[in-house]
């Protein structure tokens, strides 16, 4: 679920998050997949654990960042970023450089749709969206956040793994 929009360069966004304690997620590989499996089972820290590939604009996310909770890779804040295509407009004529999906992994479980082992996310994606904004704003006073209320209709639905999600439909633009 897309719940944030960012204006700025990839370098600036990464710097912004790294300065407040987030880490860049490792790419998915055999090594990182084995490590995240072991870390989850043994409850061992893996602050750069990979995130699954999700697609927007027929593209896998450009990068992802995360913030581990209490050294346990089963629970974490994470956010994926997709570069918007050139000359691309959101509904209402809005433009942005990046669209992002911030969600909170609350545990590991089976996907309702595929039966695969995966992280299960918190249903309240607005709470995670607001957590990201509060975390960044607390340490970066120059940050500008303009929220478009009712950008989409509020809805209750499911993500690709079958987890329930809901939102008020607001979309913050972070510059």
Image (cartoon, helix red, strand yellow):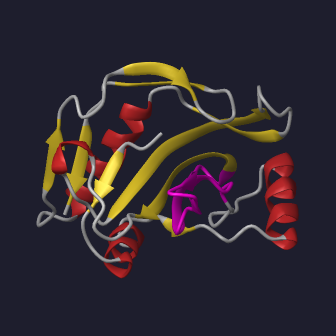
Q: Which residues are magenta?
A: 51-72
Compared across the picture, whether 145 is left or right of 119 comes to left
Compared across the picture, whether 125 is left or right of 75 comes to left
Residue 45 falls in image quadrant: bottom right
- Check the image and report above or below for 144 versus 105: below
Residue beneath the point at 42% across and 44% down: 2
**Residue found at the very far bottom of the displayed protein:** 11
**Residue found at the very far front of the displayed protein:** 87
- Check the image and report above or below for 1 versus 7: above
Residue 69 counted in the magenta span: yes
Q: Nearer the viewer, residue 17 or 60?
A: 60
Residue 17 falls in image quadrant: bottom left
Residue beneath the point at 26% across and 41% down: 171
Residue beneath the point at 33% across and 21% down: 154
Q: Nearer the viewer, residue 120 or 153?
A: 153
Residue 25 counted in the magenta span: no
Q: Position of residue 56 (x, y in %)?
A: 52, 54
Residue beneath the point at 13% across and 48% down: 146
Q: Position of residue 14 (x, y in %)?
A: 40, 73
């Amino acid at each position: 679920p897309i719940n944030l929009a960012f204006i700025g360069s990839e370098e600036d966004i990464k710097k912004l998050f790294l300065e407040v304690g987030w880490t860049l997620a490792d790419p998915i590989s055999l090594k990182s997949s084995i490590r995240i499996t072991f870390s989850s089972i043994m409850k061992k820290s893996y602050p750069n654990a990979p995130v699954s590939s999700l697609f927007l604009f027929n593209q896998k996310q450009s990068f992802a960042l995360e913030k581990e909770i209490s050294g346990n890779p089963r629970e974490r804040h994470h956010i994926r970023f997709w570069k918007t295509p050139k000359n691309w407009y959101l509904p209402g004529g809005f433009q942005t450089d990046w669209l992002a999906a911030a969600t909170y992994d609350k545990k590991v479980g089976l996907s309702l749709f595929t039966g695969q082992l995966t992280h299960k996310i918190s249903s309240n994606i607005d709470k995670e969206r607001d957590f990201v904004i509060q975390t960044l704003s607390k340490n970066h006073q120059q940050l500008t956040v303009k929220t478009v209320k009712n950008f989409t209709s509020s809805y209750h639905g499911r993500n690709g793994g079958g987890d329930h999600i809901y939102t008020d439909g607001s979309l913050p633009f972070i510059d």
